[in-house]
Amino acid sequence: MVIKKIEAFSCGKVLGALYALAGLIFGGIFSLISLVGVAGAAQGADGVAPMLFGLGAIIILPVMYGIMGFIGGIIGAALYNVVASVVGGIELEIQSSAE
């Protein structure tokens, strides 16, 4: 089997969802890190900025990663289609699980 064409919008949707999930994970990590800054507020430091950073990371990172993944998926699929039309597609060897 040879992959000759990838539907660009379909690829963009899948990569957008995957990147949004990655952004949610990274946003959660940044949020946890910002808790250290909020804990520092108990020591007299300003805790508002770290708290807003953590909240923003949970909201902004998944959205931005999702948008970048969607656009990157569309561009990547379109480039693949151009290159595959010139040099041929990716060859796959598939084996049935019944064999």
Image (cartoon, grey):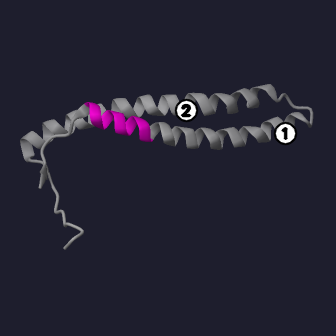
Residue 65 position, x and y percent, is 47, 33
Q: Which mark is residue 11?
A: none
Residue 28 position, x and y percent, is 63, 41
Quadrant assignment, res 47: top right
Residue ID at (62%, 32%): 57
Asked if residue 90 lies in the magenta stretch, the reply is no
Q: Are marks 1 and 2 in contact (CB under 8 Å)?
A: no
Quadrant of the image for the N terminus? bottom left
Of 12 and 83, the residue lying toward us: 12
Q: Quick check: 99 above or below 57?
A: below
What secondary structure is found at the residue carrying circle 2? helix
Q: Separation of disc 1 and disc 2 at Cα?
A: 23 Å
Relative to 27, 7 lies left or right = left
Earlier-in-chain disc, 1 versus 2: 1
Chain part drawn in magenta: 9-18
Residue ID at (92%, 32%): 44
Crowding at dot 1, Cα within 10 Å, few <14 / some 14-19 / many 20+, comes out as some
Residue ID at (20%, 39%): 6
Q: Main secondary structure of the magenta part?
A: helix
Single out the residue that lies furthest toward the bottom: 99
Quadrant of the image for the C terminus? bottom left
What secondary structure is found at the residue carrying circle 1? helix
Q: Quick check: 40 above or below 98?
A: above
Q: Amino acid at mark 2?
A: Leu
Crowding at dot 2, Cα within 10 Å, few <14 / some 14-19 / many 20+, comes out as many
Q: Amino acid at mark 1?
A: Ala
Give the residue pinned by disc 1.
39
Relative to 7, 88 lies left or right = left
Give the residue pinned by disc 2.
61
